[in-house]
Every structure is written in structure tokens, then in C-alpha cells.
Image (cartoon, coloured by chain):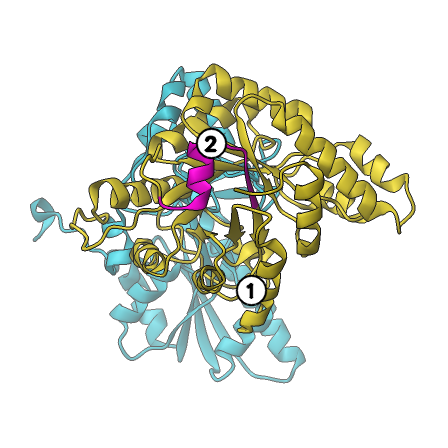
Chain colours: A cyan, B yellow
Amino acid sequence: MIVGEQKPISEIKQIVASYNKILILGCGTCVKTCFAGGDDEVAVLASALRLSCRTEGKEIEVEEQTVERQCEDEFIQESARAVGRNEAVLSLACGAGVQAMARRFASMPVLPGVNTTFMGVLEKPGLFTEECSGCGDCTLAVFGGVCPFTRCAKKLINGPCGGSQNGHCEVNSETDCAWHLIIERLKALGQMDNLRIYQPPKNWAASLSSGPRKLIREDHVL
Amino acid sequence: MKTESTGKLQQVLTSGGFAVTSECGPPRGSDPEIIRKKGDLLKGCVDAVNVTDNQTAIVRMSSIAACAHLVAMGIEPVMQMVTRDRNRIALQSDIMGAYSLGINNILCLSGDHQTFGSQPDALNVFDIDSMNLVRTVLTMREQGQDMSGFALKGAPQMFIGAAANPFADPFDYRVIRLAKKIDAGADFIQTQCVYNMERFKAWMNMAREEGLTEKVHILAGVTPMKSEGMAKYMANRVAGMDVPESLIKRMGSVSKQKAPEEGIKICLETIAELRDIKGVHGIHLMAIEWEDVVAQIVSEAGLMPRP
């Protein structure tokens, strides 16, 4: 899923400072799962914003709504009427959702309320970890299902650096060394020979390095 | 392993000699005198001088420029090159440029992560890794081609080095990684500082069993300690460093004034022991910001005169 984190209320207040009527629009898929922008977060943020503004003597009307996904027009449309009643939209979706909203409502300011952080998994309750950087050329098969491009701070593809100690990364001792995980996994799979294979330089042409990417599925084009 | 001779370091190693290399960190500024002063201290007592590439991710004079200053003084440099700051286009370009300036040794590294440095808000590159860099330099030398397969007009004939850390984890994998670096094209290896001799010997044993010491020249890293504080700092704060408690105690057992002397003594004992290990073809003496002690150590270790 896409993992995000709600911006601090102080920053959100600055972002919406010039508006008196705003719609806080939640997104019911990824950011709901990571507690950044689902309906619960919309309600809590709306109350906090109203209270904070009232304490400071500033008038603000806050409307609340959540759609299933802000990255698809079909769901975005459900917000059209509420959008029309307000001066600005504070979107609690990921960056893709914010941009999809902005594309749909050309004359409406759409403001981000969430910092989109990474593509990851829910490792255990309350802990989300980054696992994929969407490089467009997946080589997980040779690395035992652990991505060194994303999970090694130096993107090393031919083995661990000299700073790996007790299974932890030298950059952050709270982070597992990706290569420790790769080696453990390949051991378990009986594929230790993979470690001896020279991995050639990564082809970054399929990544964001070549500019924003598009995927066209001719069989689904209407 | 490269056979055609291009430099002194290579000559010493390929003729079966025991090599001595040292290190020179470029200044945080443009003053070439600082390089020249360090060069003067090292000239004649080592075969080649490693020039670090923005080590610890702190911005300094470029390794290439500092190497060129040493070349002008008649000192052979080992240009360190990290993959942290440059993509493959810049790396290849700089390798060609470096060779054109008379720099004929390279040490291929990934580099300290920028979060350890003075500008942690920098974007890192890591387009290729250190293993890929080794292979790239080899392909330039042996096939005369860049990474795209283009035939170069004048291929850099670099003597290729890589690093190894026998003290990092997972230990069993360290020799596999060494083998990979040799296959990728490393002619020589410079190791992390040896303080834990037992572990270093175990690593060398594994390397010998795999036949790796026949394929590559291993230069064991040594760093004299100046104080108990330095020993503790390296033990606790430097990633991938293994300083046994007994050595820290030994550094603390003498007065502050006598500590540098004790550090030199430990260093000399280490060098003597390293020379007895089959497959160790030299030492890489890293006297960090203590270059004036190199001549003394090399001389007292009985490694003078240099060829």
C-alpha cells in the first residue's frame, strides 16, 4: 500500500490560512489503512482545526467527506458537490490523489494534508515499512524476495557493505540490514549460490529516472 | 590480475614484494599546500598514497585534484572513488580524466553514507555499486570500452583496488564477497583496520582455502591509535570497526603523554604479525591526520628502504 503521514496541525493551519470555508477530503483506501487520511482522521482533524481556529478568534467552516479513492475519477466525482460549496479542498490522500483532484477541479485549490512517504507493508500493528520503490524492473527473484534497491541505504546489489553489524544497517541501527535478510532468506531457500553471481548495473531506464511513466493497456482503452 | 606494469604499487606487488601504502585526506578547501605538506611526509616511505574521496561524506577537495598534486610531486596516488556522489556517466568520465593526469591506481568503494557527514540533506546517487565500478574499470582496461561498449580512444590502464572488511557481519559471507570482487576485476584489496587479529586470521584462512590469495594482493589495513579515547571512539562509533577490549585497556594503561608511543608499539606488533600471514602482500597504513608518524613506523617495522 501507499503509506503516508498526516502533516502537523501547525503546518496544515498555515496551508489553509487564507480560506474560510474548506472541505477536508479523506481517502478510504491506502491512507485509511495507515491512519493518515481515512474518515476517522478526517473527523479528528476537522475538530482539531475548528477548535484551534476558534481559540485564536479565526472563523473557519470545515466540511468533512471521505471517498473510496481519490486517484480514480469515478470516486472523485462523489465529492463534486461538496467541493463546489467550499473555497478550498484539504486532501488527506497521497500525492497522486491530491493531483487527481486538482486535475478534476481546475479552478479549485487542492491542498495536501498528508506527506506521502513510501510504498510499504504493515509489518505489525502500528509499524509500516518501506519495501518497494517502483523501479519498473523487478529483480526480487535473485534476491530471495528482499529488495536491495529499496531496503539497502546504499542500493548495494552485490552484497553487504562493511558497516553491517549484528544484522543491522549502519545508517540506522533500528533498521534491518537488507543484505542480512537476503542472506538469511537465500539460506532458507537453499539458494546461497545466488550470492556468488555478479549482478550487473541496474537498468534505471524503466524507473522515474526516465521521467514520469505511463502504462497503457490497449485492451482496456475505451 | 593485471600483468602489464603501469605503476610502482603494481610493480612491487607483481614482483612478489611486500607493499606499503598510506593515506592522505584532502583538505576542506582549495589550498594545495596542505596536500603537498602531507605528500612530503609520505614521499619515499610508501609505494603509493591513497587519496580519499569526500570521506565520511564531508565535502573536501576532489580526490582527482589532490591525486594530481601528488603526481606532480612524484608521488604515486591511489585514487579512491565512491559511487555515492556520481552516476555512471560521471564516474567513467572521471576515470578517463584521472588516467590522463597520470593517476594509475584506483580504489573502488561505495562510500560512507551521507547521513554521517556534514550535509545529511544531500541526495545520494548509488547508480551502480562498488562491485559494478570494479567491473567497469576492468572493462575499460581489458576491452578498451566504456559501459555502453563504445571503443575508447585511449583506454585507462588502471590498477584496480577494492576494499574488504573482515570484521563486518555476516562473517561467513565476507569471503564470498571477496571472491566476487576478485572475479569482478580487483587486482588488490585494502582491508579495514586490523585490531582483532584472531578474526583477521580466520578470514585469511578462509580466503586461502578458497584459493583467493593466489588471485589477489591483500594489503592489511593498520591504523596507529593516539589515545585511549580514539580506541574507544573507533570501537563504539565507527561502523564496521572491531577493536578488542584488551587493546582499549592497553591504551588506557599508560599516561596520556605515553599513549601515542603505545599506539605505535601496538601498530608495529600488528605489522610484524601480519607479515607472517601467508597471503598478506602488504600493509595499508592509515595514520589519520598523523602523517608524520608514517616514516617512523615504516622504518621501525623494517620496511625501509622502499624500492
- Tell me, for residue B119, which label it has, or none: 1
- Foreground pick, B123 / A15: B123
Please, is residue B38 above or below residue B3 in the view? Answer: below
Chain that bears disc 1: B
Please, is residue A84 above or below residue B169 in the view? Answer: below
Spatial CA span between label 2 and label 1: 35 Å
Q: Would you say residue B18 sits in the magenta stretch?
A: yes
- Foreground pick, B15 / B118: B15
| Residue drawn at 41 percent across, 19 percent down | A192
Quick one: SS at disc 1? loop
- Magenta region: which residues? B6-21
Q: Position of residue B191 (x, y in %)?
A: 55, 36
* Amino acid residing under circle 2: His
Please, is residue B300 above or below residue B36 in the view? Answer: above
Answer with mark 2 or mark 1, whichever residue precedes in sequence: 1
Residue B114 in view: yes
Q: Would you say residue B234 sits in the magenta stretch?
A: no
- Tell me, for residue B178, which label it has, or none: none
Q: Residues within 10 Å of mark 1 (few under 14, many from 20)?
A: few
- Total labels drawn: 2
Instruction: Report the residue marked by disc 2.
Output: B217
Q: Quadrant of residue A148?
A: top left
Quick one: SS at disc 2? strand
State left or right for residue B36 relative to residue B225: left
Q: Position of residue A50 (x, y in %)?
A: 58, 73
Quarter of the image where the N terminus of chain B is located: top left
- Foreground pick, A190 / A121: A190
State left or right for residue B65 relative to residue B222: left
